[in-house]
Amino acid sequence: MKKRLAGAALALGTMLGCSSVLLAQEVRPSGAAQDEAARTAGHPPDLSGIWTVTGREGFRGPGTNNPGNVSMTTWAEKKYDAARPPFGDKQTFVKTNDPVQKYCDPPGVTRLYNYPWQFTILQAPDTAYMLFEFSRVWRSIAMNREHPKDPDSTWMGDSVGRYEGDALVIDTIGFNDKTWLDNAGRPHSDALHLVERFRRADHDTLELALTIDDPKAYTKSWTEQLQFKLSSSPMEETLCSVSEMEAFQRKVMDPTTTPPPRK
């Protein structure tokens, strides 16, 4: 009798287990509903891939010194007037003072999106990383923590991140003022505050809404929309070398930009 009861209990447990599995299979969402359920359950959106800039070259606004149609302050105007960039409206290779071209300084966060090289996003539970092909620089984004009350001024700033639905939102402060916003030499101050919102519009398209706020340099904040496409090419070595920059300037640019002597 005891053996029969034990057997019946085992059979009933097996049936209930199978029923639970079948029920779970029946209610499991698929497609877009499954993606939304995963995000609701705390799973971040997948932003993996190798991305390359497309369409516009960076986020330069129309006009000489009005990115995003926002005017510069007097301080920023002086900085911009002194810039001698090898790109943009004031392009020159004569005595350039581009900190990247002259010293191989890090380009800075927003300027990195101006270069036609690739980047990738690596997502870990506590940290997201952005690895850039140009100059082999990388960013570390701490997830779900606050900024320190008095962050050190650094080239890439202090970045904290969070997920909002299908977007990775990156908030960055604590910059030094040694980099340019873009290749055309537009400056920023140590008060620069960036908010970046990355989302995958479709499998092959990554969108970035970039909000720039710098009260020392610009009269108001503005937002730019950038787009990147999924690349099938691996990231390669693209290093910034002072010796190569100097050799290029001496052998190529100086002979072509120096007026010939008068006879």
Image (cartoon, helix red, strand yellow):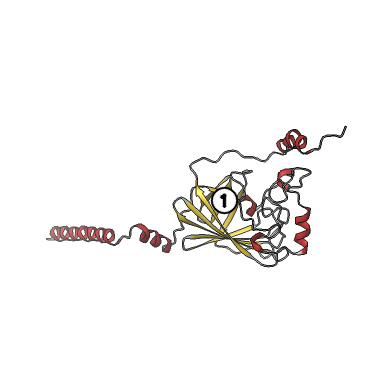
Instruction: Identify the residue at the far right of this view.
Output: 263
Q: Whole-percent x and y of residue 153?
A: 71, 57
Residue 89 or 25: which is nearer the viewer?
Answer: 89
How many numbered callouts? 1
Residue 211 spot, x, y in % from top left: 60, 62
Question: Which corner quadrant of the image does residue 188 belong to?
Answer: bottom right
Q: Residue at x 67, y 67 (%)?
A: 220
Residue 70 locus on image (x, y percent): 67, 64
Image quadrant occupied by the C terminus: top right
Determine the image quadrant of residue 258.
top right
Q: Residue 263 or 134: which is nearer the viewer? A: 263
Left or right: where 24 falls relative to 63: left
Residue 74: x percent and y percent? 77, 63
Write the residue at 68% across / 53% down. Answer: 155
When asked about the image quadrant of residue 18, the answer is bottom left
Report crowding for label 1: few under 14, some 14 to 19, many 20 or more residues within 10 A (C-alpha): some
Specify the farthest residue to the front. Answer: 263
Query: In the structure shown, which secondary structural element does the residue marked by tag 1 occupy?
Result: strand
Q: At label 1, which amino acid type do we have?
A: Met
Classify residue 263 as left or right of residue 146: right
Q: Quadrant of the N terminus?
A: bottom left
Left or right of 170? Residue 186 is right
Q: Which residue is mark 1?
A: 130
Q: Residue lying farthest left?
A: 1
Q: Residue at x 67, y 55 (%)?
A: 181
